[in-house]
Image (cartoon, helix red, strand yellow):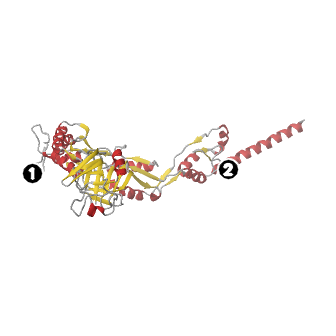
Amino acid sequence: MKNVLKGVCIGLGIICLLTAGMYLGLSWYYIGEFSYNTWINGIYCTGKSVSEVNQELSREYSYDSLTILDYEGNPYSISAELIDYRFDFAESLERYKSLQNPYLWIDNLRGGNGEKHILPIIHYDETALEEQVNALPFMQEKDSMRTRAVEIRKTDSGYCLINERDNVLNREKAREAIYNAVDQFEPEVDLQKLDCYEDLPLNEEMQQAVALWSKIQEFQDCMIVYQMGEELIPIDASVVCDWFLLNEDGSFVFDEQGNPVLDEEKPEMFIAKLAEEYDTLGGPRDFQATRGEIVTVTGGIYGNQLDRKAEAAYLLQAFKEKRIEIHTPEYKQKALYQGKDDIGDTYIEVDMTEQMMYYYEKGKCLIETPVVTGNTSLRRGTPEGVNFVYAKQKNRILRGEDYASPVKFWIPVKGAIGIHDASWRNKYGGEIYKTNGSHGCINTPYDAVKELYELVEIGTPCVMFY
């Protein structure tokens, strides 16, 4: 019995020695490595050295660049590569590992360590960063704060207030914000949101300019829009800025209430300029002829003509009343269409060189026929110009000093000149018009003029050219 007890004791002793040896062996193993069940930033670190864990953690972090937004949201970038930017966890890892007791690794079997979160130490070339920051456009301004002006200037868009003392960048705050963002490896920094812009104080002269600007702004605040066909012409600050009454030195004239005075001749001058641009009556037009070229057609009775006097009176009153409206102007004569293209895509074309007439409706040619126009040898040539159908009549007798000609269809386009059938003719086109032409009208085959009479409406443009 004694021998059995002795054997058991010896066996237990051996087991204890082996267990102790194993425990001490693992403890010695963990002296140079991280202890059992160690997790750092989501990485399993048990049995790994500080160097190994540092490499793994560094691979998990990336930082390409810092984007800097200025007051207007313009982005500028500082590349991490240019400033030799890198992460290093070694110091934090060494500090954490020093807190681990390798002989108490068994405590980790119960989850004693848990997961540890550490931040890296940031390294970068400070000289290179300073060079990058100094190279940013908004950091290179050399002007003194005292030289920043507040003044009213005239531009193509009208008078505007130039206030160089509003939203001025505080470069020291901006520099600090950029360096802090780099240290915190932030991807973006918005200088406006970080209050890096500030307003500088104004002296008395500057305050007067700001007060004057409010009156200038009110004067220029015009919301009248002219409807010229499909085109809209706004009467905005770019137009109204020329309507101030000025002294000889270019300064504003003010009334007794201190408000700018209107030069009442300027609205009238604007209407005159508008009429010169959009009046088409009798003026030259570039026209795409069916024969394939662009011809310039001048003269005729068709076109738009603004009522300048009525419009000058309207514009002056509407401006004073600060009306907000889209205005269709009054015309002394109004074409079928308004705007610069008053012919549109429905018209009659009379090519007197080719002795051809065409009728287009919504861009599609419905009639194409030879014609005979005025006799050029007798100086009765049909006049050029853009005219229009102002009447339609059947069974008319056309009379002149030496003729009385009955026609079935009469479509006058300018005075006594019109389009009609000619029963006395059996040939059309060619060069007949040079020696045996009409008295000025457009002689047209019966079937063609009959069809034209049925299709064309009063007011339709008639483009006539050689």
Asked whether, in this view, residue 307 is left or right of residue 350, the answer is left
Residue at image position (11%, 44%) is: 253
x, y (%) of residue 184? 45, 47
x, y (%) of residue 396? 26, 46
Question: Mark 1 belongs to which amino acid?
Answer: Glu
Q: Secondary structure at mark 1?
A: loop
Mark number for residue 86?
A: none
Residue at image position (75%, 43%) is: 19
Q: Secondary structure at mark 2?
A: helix
Residue at the disc numbered 1: 248
x, y (%) of residue 123? 47, 54
Residue at image position (61%, 39%) is: 114
Quadrant that contains the N terminus: top right
Residue at the disc numbered 2: 29
Is disc 1 surrounded by few (<14), some (14 to 19) or many (20+) residues within 10 Å?
few
Q: CA distance from mark 2 to mark 1?
A: 96 Å
Whether residue 168 is visible, yes or no, is no
Q: Residue 42's quadrant in the figure?
A: top right
Is disc 2 surrounded by few (<14), some (14 to 19) or many (20+) residues within 10 Å?
some
Asked whether, in this view, residue 340 is left or right of residue 49, the answer is left
Asked whether, in this view, residue 81 is left or right of residue 425, the answer is right
Q: Residue 78's quadrant in the figure?
A: bottom left
Q: In the figure, 233 relative to 443: above or below?
A: above
